[in-house]
Amino acid sequence: MKEPRQDLTNLFPQEAPLERMGLTWLVAAAIATAILWQFPGGDYILYPFTILATWFHEMGHGLMALLLGGQFQKLEIFGNGSGRATYSIALSLMPIGPGLVAAAGPMGPPIAGAALILASRSFKLASLSLKVLGSVLLLSTLIWVRSAFGFVAIPLLGLIILGIALKAPRWLQGFGIQFLGVQACVSTYHQLDYLFSSSAGSLGLSDTAQMQKYLLLPYWFWGGLMAIASLVILVQSLRVAYR
């Protein structure tokens, strides 16, 4: 009896063009997001991601303070897309501690974003990562969020992400975790001029100015270093995910 002809499409990686297309969309989204954030009104065109970027940034400050043995007292997110983390750290950690906490705002999100992108290599990890991210958004609301707008926006984002994790098809979960990872990585560029500014307006010194204060080198050096590092982290994580 003649055996049925084997489908050769199962033997060769026919999905490679689709993967490249997915990577193209992710890179295009990263570039478009970073550019739009530099223009007036860009925050509102990308409003959900603006709020998510602020959450990533402020959580970076607070969680680093906790890792250094300090306190993360509250997190405030405002309707205009700005935010503020209130924290304290031990005086014994001076001057390195405050410098690390200042750096964790811009740099924490790219590191977390890279982890999300790498998680997309496995469906189980991608689904789990979406559930963890959604849950952390909800948990942070209960523990740290202390602004009226944040009480509404942050859990809403968490519920949307959990909905994707629980109801969306696998391909959407995989692309979704990559997309959120890319957004986290490029959130460093949310306010690119802020990285190269010594002032945060009414909030006092910018993060890079805080780093200059405690780590000596000028704020523009730290701004440039973090901008480059965020890009390298994004590119390398995408290379590994699509290898």
Image: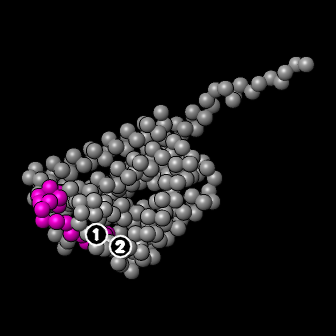
Q: Locate the N terminus and report the quarter of the image it occupies.
A: top right
Question: Viewer-proximal residue, 56 or 124?
Answer: 124
Q: Residue 85: x percent and y percent?
A: 28, 69
Crowd class of label 2 (few under 14; some 14 to 19; many from 20; radius 10 Å): some
Residue 217, placed above or below residue 12 = below
Give the residue type at disc 2: Trp
Q: Is residue 150 left or right of residue 230?
A: right
Q: Residue sitting at 17 percent across and 61 percent down?
A: 98
Q: Residue 47: x percent and y percent?
A: 42, 65
Q: Which residue is mark 1?
A: 72
Question: Viewer-proximal residue, 82 or 105?
Answer: 105
Q: Residue 38: x percent and y percent?
A: 31, 57
Q: Is there any visible trace of residue 182 in the rendered image?
A: no
Q: Residue sitting at 42 percent across and 75 percent down?
A: 142
Q: Residue sitting at 28 percent across and 73 percent down?
A: 73
Q: Residue 17: x percent and y percent?
A: 57, 34
In which quarter of the view is residue 69 placed?
A: bottom left
Q: Which range is magenta?
A: 82-99
Q: Which residue is mark 2?
A: 144
Q: Earlier in the sequence, mark 2 or mark 1?
A: 1
CA distance separating discs 2 and 1: 8 Å
Question: Viewer-proximal residue, 214 or 197?
Answer: 214
Give the residue type at disc 1: Phe
